[in-house]
Amino acid sequence: MKLNEEQMELIRAVAEEQLTAQSAFDAVHRGGDWRTRITPARAEALPDGERVDLSGDWSVLRWPFSEREEVLASPSFQDLYWERIPQPGKVFALNPNIDPRTIPNWDRTEMLHVSPEDGAMLRRTVTVPSCWKGKEIFLNLDAVYPASHVWVNGTLIADHKSGLTQMCRNITDLVDPGKEAVIAVRLFRTHERIMLDMPRHSSDFAGLSQPAFLFAKEPCHIEDYYLPALLSDDLSAGELSGSVRIRNGSPSTRNGILTIRLTDPKGCFAGQKSFPVDLPEGDTVTVPVSLSVDEPALWNDEHPNLYFVRMTLSVPGIPEDAYSFRTGFRRLSFRDGKPYLNGNPVKFRGVNHLTHHPRSGLFTPREWLRRNLETMKLANVNCIRTHFMGPRDLTDLCDEMGFYLIQELPIDWGTNYIHKPDWVGPAMMRIEAGISRDRNHPSVMIWAVGNENMPESDEAAPDGWMHLHLYELLAKRLDPNGLTMFPPPGPGGPIEGILELRVGEIADMHYSFRTVKRFLEEGAAVNPYSWTPSFERTTREEALERGWTGSWFSSEYCLFSCYPDILFTPNRCSVIDDEKQTYPPDTPQIKVFYDRLKREWGYLRSEETCLGGAYFPWISGGSSISLGHPFSWTVLSEDNDWGVMTPELLPKPNYWVLRNLFSPVWFPDEIPWYDGETSLTLELWNQFNDIDLSECTIRITEVGETSRWRDLAIELAPGARKVFSVPFFYDGTRKALEQGITCTYRFWLIDPDGMVRTAKDVCIVPAGKPRREEECRFRISPEPAYLKNSIN
C-alpha cells in the first residue's frame, strides 16, 4: 500500500506534532475531517539516588462511591476503614469459580460487561524526604491497568488511559519536602480505548501492574537521552552517539558541563568525554554527544557484554545531577536478506511472553521474571516477543542475561478502529512512551508495532494503512537505529495467510506458512487489503524499495493446547495448522507436538532469510485462586492452555520438546551407512552466533549409559555448515551394519559453559539392506559377549 502525497504530508505533520507537543491538544487536519487528541508521552530519565517506593499496602475503596472522586482523593478524607491491598498487584480479576459466559454482556475484547465507572479509589500516604528541598520532584507510575486518574494532595495531575505505559509528572508545586503527601489513584476497570491494551489476555485484571515511586532531580537536570551504542562495519570501533536533553528549571541562565564516562564489562575505564552546555533560563536544550571505543566487547545472547554509562551534569552552585545505565555494542545487519549479528549469521529462537503472574496478575515481580528467563535459557530460547508490552524489569533482564527482545507496542486487534482518526492519538502516545523508555537497551532488536491490525473493509483501508505508515514513521523518528515489524493477523475465512511486508523493515507472519513459501518461490506476495477482502500484490523489488530488509520472522506459530494432564487428545490439540495430521486416538499429544514443532521450527531455522520465530506462547495468562502450586483451577484468558510452562513455572512435557528442537545444533534422526565405508558421514549446521563448535564438546555415549564415551574434535564456525566423518570406535559396529542390523549412537552437545544443549539418539541404518528386527547399540569398547554374539 503506497501512500499518495497528501497522505504523506499528513503523517509527517502528525508525527511532528506528537514529537514536539509540550501538552495535550487536538490536532486537526483535512479541513476538520481528521482530528485526534495528541498527548506527549516522552519518558523522563530516571536519576541515580534516592527514590520513595510506593510498593506496599494501599487503602482501597471499591466503586460505587458515596462521595465524589475529588473528595475521596483529598488529604483530609479519612481512609482508615478501607480495604488494605498490596500494590503493585491485582485489585480486580476474573473470579475463576464463575463461568464467564454467565456474566451479562461478557466480552473480554472490549470489556462491555463492565460499567465505565466501575473500579476503585486507591490511596497511599508517604513522607517526601526533607533532603529534596530545592529539587524538582516527580511521581512515576510505570503502569496502572487499564486506566486511571492520578491525584496528588487533592489535585488531579493525570487522566491516563493507557494500561501498559508509564505516567510521570512533575509534582514539585504540590508537595512539601519533609511532610506527608497523599497519592490517590482512581482506578477504572475499562475505558473507551481499552482494545489497544489487549484486555482479552488480562483476565479482567485491574490495579497497579508495575512499580510506582517518587524521585527528585536538581533544578538543572537531564530530561531524556538517546545514546545508542553503534558499531563500525568491521566491528572494530564502537561509538556511543546521540543526544541528551537538558532542562534548566532555575530562575537564571546557567553554564554547565555534561560528562559521559564509560566502564567496560570488566569494570575498567573505557573512555570519558565532556561537553560544555549553555542553559537559558527556563529552557530545554538538546546536546549532541559522542564517545568512541576501540575494539569494544560485543553483546549477543551468548556473551551479553554490558558497558556501564554514567552521565553527570555539573552546574556551579547546584548539586551534581547523575544518571547511570547499561549498554552493549552490537550490530544487526542484512545481506541479500540474510540476517547477521556482529558479522555472523543469527537465528532468533523465540517465545511469546504474555506477562502474567499466577497470584499478582499483570504485576510480574523481578525475581519471578528472572526465573522465567533462567528457565528459557535452559530451553535454548534466545529471543522474547512481548505480547503485552513488557515491564521495565524485563528489558533490564534481557540486557543482562542475553535475550533478543521484540518489544510489542500496544495497538491490539485494531480491525474496527485502525482507520479512525480519534484512535490515532492514543496509539501514538503508547508508541512514544514505549520507545522512549526502552530505546537505549541493547536487547531491544525490533519494535513490533501493534498486533494483528488490518482494516475492516476496503472503504476503511486507505486511512487504516495510512495510520500504520504513520506509526512506522513515528517509531523511526523516535529510534532511527531500531527496526520495525507489523505482526499481521493469521489465516481466517478466505485469507489463507499474510506475509506483512507492506509496512515494517522485518516482514512478519502468523501461523500459516503458505504465503511466505509462495513468496520465496515466486518473488511476490498476494496479501489482503482488508477483511472484505480484496487482495493486492507486492513484489520483492517493491518491498525492498520501500525499505524492507529482505528478512522475515514468524512472531506467532505452532498454536497447540498443552494441558499437562491431557495425554491423549492427538487430533484436538493442534490448532491453525497448514498440514493438519490425523493420528490414532492412543497417540500421546507430545508426539503430535514434536512432529508439528519440528516441521514448523525446522522450516524457520533452515530458511536463510528468516530471522527466526516466536513460539506462541511461553505461559498462558489466566485467573486462578493459586495456592502456590502449579495445578490450581484456572480460567484461561483464551480458553486453552497454550504455553509450555505452568504459571508456577513448572515445565510441562512440551517444554522438553521445545528445548530439544531449539538446540543451536541439530543431529539427524538417522545416518545411512553404505557397504565398504569405514566411517559415518554427518552434516552439522552451527547456529550459535559466535561460538565455534571447537569450543563445544560433541560427545558420543552408549545408549542408556554415560560411563563410557568418546568425543569428536570438530571445528565449525558460527553459521557454517559442513560434512564430517565420524569414525567407528569399535569394529563390531561396522560388522553389525554389514549384517543389516541398525545401530544407535547417542550424541550430546555440550556448550563451553558445560551446559548440555541437547542429546539425540541417532540411528545408523544399513543402506540397501533389509532391516533386521534386532538392534545393536553402539559400543565404544569390545567387551560384552552378547554384542559379539549379535554380530557373528
Image (tube, rainbow, N blue to C red):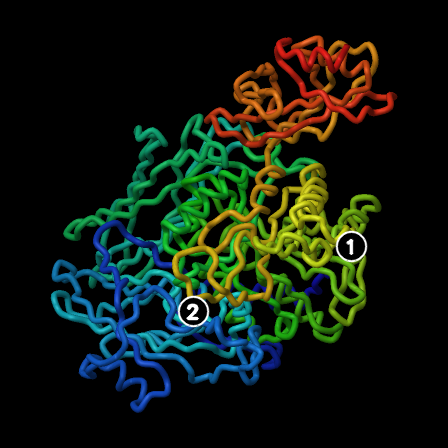
Q: Is residue 551 visible?
A: no
Count the labels in the image: 2
Q: Which residue is mark 2?
A: 145
Q: Secondary structure at mark 1?
A: strand
User: Residue 594 appears in which quarter of the rendering?
Assistant: top right
**What amino acid is labelled 1 in the image?**
Thr
Q: Are marks 2 and 1 in contact (CB under 8 Å)?
A: no
Residue nearest the viewer, comparing 432 with 193: 193
Quadrant, the N terminus: bottom right
Q: Which residue is mark 1?
A: 538
Disc marking residue 759: none
Picture coordinates of residue 59, whole percent (x, y): 26, 74
- Image-based side of 486 in relation to 90, left or right: right
Residue 366 sits above or below residue 779 on the image: below
- Image-based side of 607 in relation to 630, left or right: right
Residue drawn at x 82%, y 19% as measured from the top left: 740
Residue drawn at x 78%, y 16% as measured from the top left: 737
Q: Which residue is most to the bottom?
A: 66
Picture coordinates of residue 137, whole percent (x, y): 23, 63
User: Residue 84 appears in which quarter of the rendering?
Assistant: bottom left
**What amino acid is labelled 2 in the image?**
Tyr
Picture coordinates of residue 481, whole percent (x, y): 52, 46
Q: Secondary structure at mark 2?
A: strand
Picture coordinates of residue 393, whole percent (x, y): 39, 51
Q: In this rendering, which labeled residue sits more in front, label 2 or label 1? A: 2
Crowd tier of the residue under label 2, counting other residues whose Cα lies within 10 Å: few below 14, some 14–19, many 20 or above: many
Residue drawn at x 23%, y 54% as measured from the top left: 254
Quadrant, the C terminus: top right
Residue nearest the viewer, comparing 56 with 460: 56
